[in-house]
Image (tube, rainbow, N blue to C red):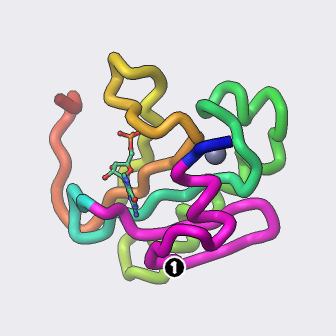
Amino acid sequence: MDCLFCKIVAGEIPAEIVHTTERTVAFRDLNPQAPTHVLVVPKDHYANAAELAAGAPVAAAELVTAAAAVATAEGCDDYRLVFNTGAGSGQTVFHTHLHLLAGRAFTWPPG
Ligand code: 5GP
Ligand code: ZN
């Protein structure tokens, strides 16, 4: 499958990997929107968060615990986790990824 994040998981495209677990890989976003902006992806391909949760619930939970571990490692107690789902929400890569954003103040509601 021609998938950017599958290629990062496979090591075929370089990325700054900051954390790995049995089922996940976390790497820095190429176009960071906060001082800490890390993407946590499952090693297996699922198009979005709901498909991951339905097909691999342990991996879905591991995305969250991995994101929390990265936040702790970066010294951030407060952070935002985002799953964009569908092009209308801003999803551009259809291999599910959890955005970890931290290191600045965030507004609510999001834009
Ligand atoms: P989405 O818009 O799908 O929620 O998030 C995709 C994210 O992937 C964007 O924040 C974008 O900056 C990031 N991204 C796109 N291509 C690459 C890449 O080749 N390497 C890395 N590290 N991040 C990427
Ligand atoms: Zn993929």
Q: Is residue 36 above or below residue 74?
A: above
Q: Is residue 72 visible?
A: no
In this picture, which residue range is highlighted in magenta?
4-30
Task: Give left or right: position of 106 versus 41.
Answer: left
Residue 99 on image: x %, y %: 43, 51
Q: Which residue is at 22% across, 70% downward?
A: 35
Judge whether residue 5 is colored magenta. yes
**Horizontal side of residue 2 vs 27, given as left or right:** right
Residue at disc 1, secondary structure: strand
Between residues 4 and 72, which one lies in front from this camera angle? 4
Work out whether residue 8 or residue 106 is closer to the camera in this orientation and state it. Answer: 8
Horizontally, residue 58 falls left or right of residue 29, namely right
Q: Report the residue at 43% width, 47% height from top.
A: 81
Residue shown at 68% from the left, 53% from the top:
42
Q: Nearer the viewer, residue 64 or 11?
A: 11
Note whether 58 is above or below 88 in the view shown.
below
> Which picture quadrant has residue 96?
top right
Badge 1 is on which residue? Answer: 18
Q: Position of residue 36 (x, y in %)?
A: 31, 69
Q: Quadrant of the C terminus?
A: top left
